[in-house]
Image: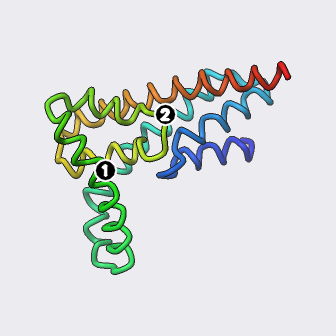
Amino acid sequence: MSLKLLYAILLTLMPITELRIGLPLAISYALENNVPVFLIFFLIVSVNILLIFFVFFFLDYIHKYLMNIKFYKKIFHGVLKRFRKKVDKFESKYKTAEVLSLALFVAVPLPGTGAWSGCLLAWILDLDRKKSILGISLGVITAGIIILFGSLGFAKLFNML
């Protein structure tokens, strides 16, 4: 496995970069090494979807023990305070259409709207777990497709210059 592909996978697992940075890097790797783009797309999107289960496990089981550590508690409360505005806005508008709402929230390919944020949002609002996983997964796939087309478009643009 190439170092560039490994970086892409690691970036896909990170809370801020996620798919938005990992997928373009992985597509770049695929184009440079004649690897099928669909295969790389499937790998990166699958990694981001598998991340959902890790985040929920972390929030359900590990988080409560880490809250006893002052440093973690301070950071978590800071993140939660910034995230609370998104939560309030989401809850007031979209509580009845959980799956679609989470999918749309996660699908927006901007920092702070990926699988990590979708899981945190679902966890804070105590949404149905199966529906949340479905909605977040659909959002990840949608964001992946948007980023895929954007990345391929930029690659073609640079090849034409």
Q: Is residue 24 above or below residue 59?
A: above
Residue extending furthest left? Answer: 96
Residue at the spot x=66%, y=46% of the render?
6
Residue 63 picture location, percent across and down = 30, 64
Residue 148 picture location, percent across and down = 59, 25
**Circle 1 SS class:** helix
Residue 26 picture location, percent across and down = 66, 35
Residue at the spot x=44%, y=25% of the render?
142
In front: mark 1 or mark 2? 1
Quadrant for the N terminus in the image = top right
Q: According to the image, label 2 marks what residue? A: 46
Which mark, residue 120?
1
| Quadrant in the rendering for residue 136 | top left
Relative side of 31 to 47, left or right: right
Residue 45 picture location, percent across and down = 50, 32
Separation of marks 1 and 2 at Cα, in angstroms: 19 Å
Residue at the spot x=34%, y=29% of the render?
104
| Quadrant in the rendering for residue 43 | top right
Which mark, residue 90?
none
Amino acid type shown at disc 2: Ser
